[in-house]
Amino acid sequence: MNAPAAINSITGTADSGRITKRFAALKAEGRGGLVTFITAGDPDADTFRDLLSGLPDAGADVIELGIPFSDPMADGPAIQAASLRALKAGANLRKTLDHVRDFRKSDDDTPVILMGYFNPIYKYGVEKFLADFKDSGADGLIIVDLPPEEDPELCIPALEAGVNFIRLATPTTDDARLPAVLKNTSGFVYYVSILGITGTKSAGNDDIQFAVERLKRHTDLPVAVGFGINSADAVRDIGTIADAAVVGSAIVNCIAANLDNNSRAKPGLVDHVLSFVRELASGVRG
């Protein structure tokens, strides 16, 4: 399957949104990108707001926000704990969209992706969610528990609404399965480099390079690689193999390391986390 880059398979029109523009800019700069993940509302609304607003200047090329959920089955202990902290602090899907809306008041360029599970969206109502999603200024969705067979539930309505629907590919996604995975994917492809949950182990660079090359034989969409990337050196390595490196658990662990015994933010948490993001970004920014 060879589809033109960033072509919406529903409308047949080119995607000229923030995600496509950002990856085009990265390609023009001749470097890989850094996608940073944090959980919306973690550890509290005010601290999260400061973290979110500081990520672009710290070097995040794309921001991925986890939608707080009580049962994030694809995520490891670090992100599970972050989701529970956020929920305890009052976070929810509506407030997540409000955070994006506030972020857009000062940043109209950095792509923002929401990653999560279908349950909160189903409860919110798909039509209402997509309308509010667009209004907030968010750009893409990663919904890990909706396979291609369930595209009519959210993927196709999202694409029809002009929302990038980003699909995951894994080491077990073989050539027979890839066409179904890629059919309605837009924005970029997220390659999960390991089998298992987030933040537990890392894959070898040779294996990742082989997988990325295989994906690129099937699609012209950018490929971002995540799971197990936790240092500037790892970001640098992935940036030479793929179009972007995704770092999540390592940043969430940095947040957790700056909490007190009651899971409240210690003074300096935001500075510590953004400093770590700058260190990660040095891997692709020279």
Image (tube, grey):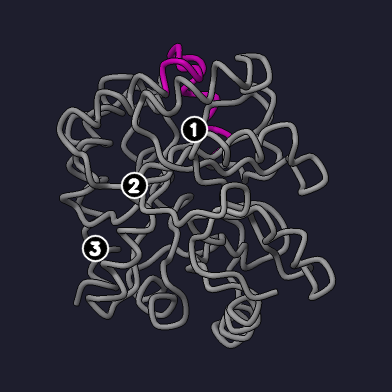
Q: Which residue is drawn at 62% across and 46% down?
A: 76
Among the 4 quarters of the image, the one containing residue 259: top left
Few, some or many residues within 10 Å of mark 1 (<14, 14–19, 20+) = many
- The Cα–Cα distance between marks 3 and 1, rounded to whole angstroms, is 22 Å
Residue numbers of the magenta segment: 79-96
Q: Position of residue 55 (x, y in %)?
A: 24, 45
Residue type at the position of mark 2: Pro
Image quarter in which the C terminus is found? bottom left
Q: Residue at x 60, y 72 (%)?
A: 219
Q: Is mark 3 on a helix, strand or loop?
A: helix
Query: In the figure, 61 relative to 42: above or below?
Result: below
Name the residue beneath numbered marker 2. Answer: 111
Question: Residue 179: which numbered mark, if any?
Answer: none
Few, some or many residues within 10 Å of mark 2 (<14, 14–19, 20+) = many
The answer to which of marks 1 and 2 sits earlier in the sequence is: 1
Comparing labels 1 and 2, the label whose residue is closer to the camera: 2
Among the 4 quarters of the image, the one containing residue 232: bottom left
Q: What element carries label 1?
A: helix
Name the residue beneath numbered marker 3. Answer: 279
Name the residue beneath numbered marker 1. Answer: 82
Q: Where is residue 188 in the image (x, y as percent from the top left)?
A: 50, 60
Residue type at the position of mark 1: Ala
The answer to which of marks 3 and 1 sits earlier in the sequence is: 1
Query: In the figure, 131 relative to 258: above or below?
Result: above
Among the 4 quarters of the image, the one containing residue 95: top left
